Amino acid sequence: MCKTCGCSDGAQTRITHLGVARGDAPDTLESPGDVPGYAHEHRHGDAAVHNDGVHSHAHGGAGSHLHPHPHVPPADGNAHLVSLEARILDKNDRLAERNRGWLAGRGVFSLNLMSSPGAGKTTLLEKTLAELAGEFPLAVVEGDQETTHDAERIRQAGCNVVQINTGQGCHLEADMVAQGLQEIDPAAGSVVFIENVGNLVCPALFDLGEAARVVILAVTEGEDKPAKYPHMFHGADLILINKIDLLPYLSFDLERCLGYLHEVAHHAEVLQISAATGAGLEPWFAWLRAHRNKALSEAGKVLTGS
Ligand SMILES: Nc1nc2c(ncn2[C@@H]2O[C@H](COP(=O)(O)OP(=O)(O)OP(=O)(O)O)[C@@H](O)[C@H]2O)c(=O)[nH]1
Ligand SMILES: [Mg+2]
């Protein structure tokens, strides 16, 4: 259940790993999907489909796993709902911490990429994969309510990708990402991009275990989005103002937008980019390289005890 709109209550999640050959993971590398606490995910009548290298399975979704549904309405419905929401978010947070530890232990840098629908998340990923593919391993977890369109685009770019379809759910949750990570099995030193479901509200509530949050705001959405949806921007480490190639044709007030961002997310770095033309992307690539190198060196320090 989503605290804001109840969207994942009863949602049907499907996970599809698109066509990238999976190497056999060494037994010593524990997947978050295999650790105690995840095992229950596969005891609810999962259906598995293997078809021409595409591996998919459907299950009852986060809502059906995370909380029992009461059959008798509680006397104080609101209090019950609040405590139910708190328990769901608590459980999500615990699973997110597990993802985070697992990723950090492998020296994998992961980021949660969020925006409104159509702000340019997948376009940015396509450009990023083209730039960085030769430098270090990259993988993508795609989140959408329906279709594998985005995962197909990422696969076309030659990248290891898993698609999570959330059905009615309007955001990814940590247990879904754990299963996605198990599928893509990212190598040490990878960057894992998690493209969340397009939505400026609910994804902000759910920690996925990512190391950083990146939020895209397209200039076509209007300059007031940070003021209207402050939680999303407040949680961001990096904010990308996208589609700046369209600024000459719009009445978007960039200064006002930057003012709103300063109010709600003064700690976040802000870059102006065009994912379509590639303008302004060098600082984004540099940001990724720096965070990826840091994640790898910190994992090395833990392993060597230095
Ligand atoms: N002009 C312009 N168009 C862009 C830019 N970035 C993305 N687009 C276009 O915006 C549309 C949506 O882009 P996507 O990358 O699919 O957006 P998304 O955020 O992944 O969308 P969802 O996954 O559906 O939420 C596409 O038609 C892109 O070509 C940009 O920088 N400039
Ligand atoms: Mg997309």
Image (cartoon, rainbow, N blue to C red):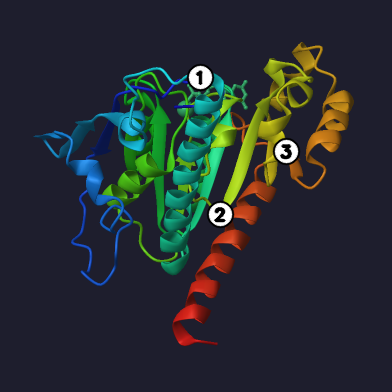
Q: Where is residue 31 shown, x and y percent of the image?
A: 30, 59
- Residue ID at (42%, 43%): 174
Residue 5 is left or right of residue 144, and the answer is right
Task: Determine if the C-beta at disc 3 is less than 8 A from ligand 1.
Answer: no
Which SS class for mark 2? loop
Q: Where is residue 215 shown, x and y percent of the image?
A: 63, 36
Q: Amino acid at mark 3?
A: His
Give the vertical position of 41 relative to 147 (above or below).
below
Mark 3, residues whose alpha carbon is within 10 Å: few (<14), some, or many (≥20)? many
> In terms of sequence position, does the residue under pointer 1 or pointer 3 come before the other?
1
Give the residue number, with chain letter if any, for mark 3: 234
> In terms of sequence position, does the residue under pointer 2 or pointer 1 come before the other?
1
The one of 143 and 246 positioned closer to us in this rendering: 143
Q: How many discs mark residues in the rendered view?
A: 3
Q: Quadrant of the N terminus?
A: top left
Which SS class for mark 1? helix
Q: Where is residue 110 shown, x and y percent of the image?
A: 50, 52
Q: Where is residue 200 shown, x and y percent of the image?
A: 61, 25
The one of 288 and 84 positioned closer to us in this rendering: 84
Res 234 quadrant in image: top right
- CA gap, disc 1 and disc 3: 31 Å
> In terms of sequence position, does the residue under pointer 2 or pointer 3 come before the other?
2
Give the residue number, with chain letter if any, for mark 1: 77
Numbered tag placed on residue 211 in the rendering: 2
Give the vertical position of 31 relative to 158 (above or below).
below
Q: Amino acid at mark 1?
A: Gly
The one of 41 and 258 positioned closer to us in this rendering: 41
Mark 2 in CB contact with mark 3 (< 8 angstroms):
no
Mark 1, residues whose alpha carbon is within 10 Å: few (<14), some, or many (≥20)? few
